[in-house]
Image (spheres, rainbow, N blue to C red):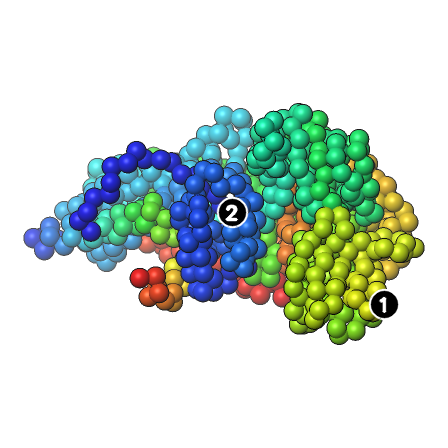
Amino acid sequence: MTGLALLIPVALGLGLLGLAGFFWSIKNGQFDDADGAALRILIDEEDEL
Amino acid sequence: MTATTPNRAPVELPISDFAVPGMRCAGCISKLESGLALQTGIVNARVNFTAKRVSITHLPEMTMPQLLDAISGIGFEAVAISESSGDADNKEAKRLLKAMAVAGFAMMNIMLLSVSVWSGATGVTRDLFHWLSALIALPTVAYSGQPFFRSAWGALRKGRTNMDVPISIGVIITTALSLYETFNHGQHAYFDGVVMLLFFLLTGRWLDAVMRDRARDGVSALLKQTAAGAMVLQPDGETAWIDAKALGPNMVMLVAAGERLAADGIVTEGISSFDLSLLTGETTAQSVVIGSIVHAGTLNLDAPVHVRVTAAGADTAIADIARLMEQASQGKSLYVRVADRAARLYAPAVHTLAALSFLGWMVAGAGWHESLLVAVAVLIITCPCALGLAVPAAQIVVAGALMRAGILVKDGSALERLAEVDLAMFDKTGTLTMGRPTPTNLTDANGEQKSVLLALARASRHPLSEGIRRTLEAEGVAAAKIEQVREVAGAGVFATANGCAVSLGRPNTEISHEGLASELQIEGQPSFAVHFSDQIRPQAAATLAELQGLGLTSSIISGDRAESVAPVARALGITAQTSMLPQEKLDAIARQKAAGHKVLMVGDGLNDGPALAAGYASIAPASASDAGQNAADVVFMGDALSPVATAIRAARRTQHIVRQNFILAIGYNVLAVPLAIAGYVTPLIAAAAMSGSSLVVVANALRLKNAAK
């Protein structure tokens, strides 16, 4: 039973953390430009310095 | 980054959005963002590649045309987008997504607890797990159930019923009974079933909303906003860009060649000709002189003119068309979606069944508690989980496939209606034809003439030059090197090539050819006249034949004169009605409707707007007017007409799969309901049956992935 008392809150807490992260990313527009984010990594920004 | 920014008063800089359909790669993103940021007056540019848009933060004094010039200076074609009107819809999709995320989280955690109960937990452990499940499930039901409760309540208040009524009743009764069981140390709690049900149903709803959003974004990226405003002559002699909404009577607009009018008015200076095709469907340009009345939405072809505004905004001739459209579109809102039609039969049947099994068990001598448990099991098993997924899953797969093929479907109901049409009516100008002048005799020009032509055409934005440029660029002609380029409004483009004077412009000699023409002069060579006509769209004949094969008879309803329509009708072998006003097009559709036909309207112009709204389903090309695109159910890209047939074929296949899905869902009920009535359904069986049937339905819908081929 002591195991349960520890494991269940841990499991729920981790799940809630994921849920909170998902809500945060929706609110901050992380999914607004999925294709663009994939391409931006290819941009060479050295010349801007 | 320790330095703080200087303490300036925060100034809200204006942000303008532009659609840039030409961006294709990472290079385009950096070219746009860094290139624009270097220009004076532009503070920042941010590209959204998915939506093919760029939002520019700029100084307040930058005007629309200046910003457009800045983008075209970097080598991209852009169109201004007005502030998005559909923010409310977008919020709905986000709300559904959040509700779905909560339900998903709760479902997984409750399932974890439920599995231990099913695998034999008893006594205190089982009670503890039930309590924990209740703790997770109750807030989830309160949060994620809202979309259903709200819609069910709305329907009940009007004395109607929809899909959400049985869902809400099922969810509430099951939650209440499970809570009662938990209090009394009962063996079965259905928290996992309730939450899983919400999760699957929300998935269906969310898919539906995403589909609407995606198509709407696609369409608003196309809206050309050609008449977003006008250069207005100020009293002090300066000019300023004024938004279409702010235009008022007696302002004087300076309309350059190639610009669309933003308001109705009277020409006060200049001589030109106007293209009315978007407004009336007529292809022949109308010449205007001082005192001529011109309408918003028409295109100035030849020379700059001054137009004194007589009516703007809601008072223009366009507004009349808008009113007709509004009336016509009321018919469409009466359409009942397939899923709701199914629910009308399904909901009463399910409720009767649950009530009967409750009564049956009571009569057979079981206690009210046991009878209620059976009734809840029946409700859970029959809850339209698969039914709620059956339609949206199929429709979003097809909409995705169609979108990849360049066909945007506005929403699910559009697909359902499109599958049922049995008669097609086409507009001519811009729909069966390209709606823009295309040179017809360029093959007669020699190599030198072609390369000079292309160079000159590139120097001008006149519609005829655009036509020449597009054709020659498609041929792969290399442009000649020209110098000292100057464009004389109303006369043409003048330059020198290899020391010879060259020009492209208004024909000097009177060319007795019907329609438009322009003339290429190269010093020391005979002149070459380029003739233009409005070409029939590629694959138009093949598409009409395919529609015939699908059981659709086609005809033309055009606002253009009979002489212009006849050649097209003859070439395509279909009948035509001509010189029709927007109201007459509406009447033609109403007549066919009265005769029992479901009319597909295909059109593009402003004058087609009411007809597009009135048709049982409607399709517009991406080159259509804003009004046309807004009224249409489906918008297709590209020049070819074949997407019309593709869309109908895909819609019919979708309907076929949806019907299969319904049969699967009902078949599952036929098997499971007797078990539930007999009292054999435990939460474990309910959970397995529910997810099993949902998976089958989604898998079946995925077969539509190639429906657009």
3D distance between C-alphas at marks 1 and 2: 41 Å
Q: Nearer the observer, disc 1 or disc 2?
A: 1
Q: Which residue is drawn at 61% across and 27% down?
A: B235
Figure quadrant of the C terminus of chain B: bottom right
Is residue B660 visible in the rendered structure shown here? no
Which percent across, then down, holds residue B222? 59, 49
Are marks 1 and 2 in one subunit? yes
The residue under the point 49% across, 41% down is B62
Q: Is residue B404 visible?
A: yes
Amino acid type for the residue under numbered disc 2: Leu
**Residue B472 placement: quadrant:** bottom right
Residue at 84% from the left image edge and 64% from the top image edge: B527
Residue under mark 1: which chain is it in?
Answer: B
Say which of B289 and B126 sits in front: B289
Toward the bottom, the furthest residue is B447
Q: Do the residues labelled 1 and 2 touch (CB within 8 Å)?
A: no
Q: Name the residue under label 1.
A: B526
Left or right? Give the position of B407 relative to B465. left
Question: Which residue is drawn at the image coordinates 75% and 74% (left, top)?
Answer: B447
Q: Which amino acid does the dot numbered 1 rest on?
A: Pro
Q: In this view, does B380 lie above or below B583?
A: below
Q: Mark 2 sits on what residue?
A: B67
What's the chain of the residue with tag 2? B
> Is B483 drawn above or below residue B183 in the view shown?
below
Disc 1 residue crowd, few under 14, some 14–19, many 20+, Cα 10 Å: few
Q: Hey, which residue is sitting farthest front in the picture?
A: B499
Please state which of residues B327 and B335 is positioned toward the viewer in this rendering: B327
